[in-house]
Image (spheres, rainbow, N blue to C red):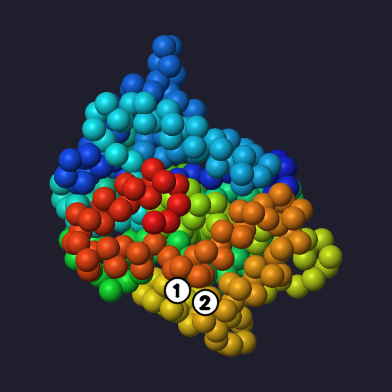
Amino acid sequence: MRLDFARSQRSSVGIEWELQLLDADDGDLRQAAETILAELAGADGEPHPNVHPELLLNTVEVVSGVCRTVGDALADLEHAITDLRRVTDPLRIELAGAGSHPFAQPAFQKVTNRERYARLIDRTRWWGRQMQLYGVHVHVGIEDRAKTLPIMRALLTRFAHLQSLSASSPFWNGQDTGYASNRAMMFQQLPTAGVPYQFDTWSELEHYVDDLTRTGVIDTFSEVRWDIRPSPALGTVEVRVCDAATNVEELRATSALTHCLVEHYSSMLDDGKDLPTAPRWFVVENKWRSARYGMDAVLIRDGGGEEELVTETVTAMLSELEPVADRLGCLEDLACVQRILHDGASYQRQLRVAEAGGLNAVTDSLVAEMRAGRPL
């Protein structure tokens, strides 16, 4: 199967942020996406360009356009959220971000009425019905298809660090899971989700997609739901490993770090340098360590098996990427990562809130952070 890779401006950026719809009175999930999207549609019935449906009716996804900087992409998302609130506030619905809801029961959630979602649930059954999960996807433009797979392999040496920084799903169905990102563990149960395969050539990827299509595993490439994947239709690398951010500031931080990493590896290829790689077994182990321990994870740093605390590696990354961030116009955005290193990630705040006030207090805190646009 031929996978044509669209032309894309180098290091252009787009962001997708999945948001929960919460009842303003009890903090539980509301099955209101269809009503909200209908209200947002134009007079001609055209859907809102920056607000999309998702698998579950308790979710909407806000998406940016194709932007030059992370700041521009975030401005698109904030405008979309302003439009959303004009509809959700009168309905007494709050918006919240996090990789999972603290206490909502998956069995009670309704699936969006679309054929592709019906097929997914029919095939995956119980596991599919557990996908009460919310993430962030960052697209970065790649100007030459030949760069795509090497950049993906390099990103797999650092994707667990992004997962730790963004971890925001310690609770599931009313329970403390003991994981910083339980979303990471749940989502990989889908047949084509989780850690990607590392292909050396584009033709190997095409053979893989052809095999999956011929055997009925997928109908389109979009059903390959890896943590990092190429997006041939857009000409991007799409990084999907992050839990949904609970506020704009932390979304800004992880998006800028992703943007800088892709541009950094692209520049290394331009200079004829070898990109870092790691064998699949190290990559899989890092994903698990990050999901389990979050900011306290000791991750395998490279293919040689050297290990380092995630915070130490990220600190070194920020110094290395500073010139890249200056080039991309996101120095201030990248600096937001420092606050996560200093104050901790969302899952840590949620655990503290739950210990003091229970899980309803956690949903209150998620709503407050969303409105404040920063960690609280």
Element class at badge 1:
helix
Measured in 3D between alpha carbons, the distance from the residue under mark 1 to the one under mark 2, in whole angstroms, is 6 Å
Above or below for 164 versus 256? below
Residue wearing tag 1: 295
* Residue 82, visible in the rendered structure: yes
Decide which of 290, 317 is in the foreground and name it.
Answer: 317
**Are the residues at dot 1 and dot 2 in contact (C-beta closer than 8 Å)?**
yes
Residue under the point 54% across and 51% down: 252
Residue flagged by tag 2: what amino acid is it? Answer: Val
> Looking at numbered disc 1 in the image, what kind of residue is underneath it?
Met
Q: How many marks?
A: 2
Vertical position of residue 68 compared to residue 123: above or below: above
Q: Quadrant of residue 88?
A: top left
Q: Residue at 55% across / 42% down in the picture? A: 74
Question: Which quarter of the figure is the C terminus placed in?
Answer: bottom left
* Residue 87 % position (x, y): 33, 26
Percent from the top left, x then y, of residue 143? 73, 48
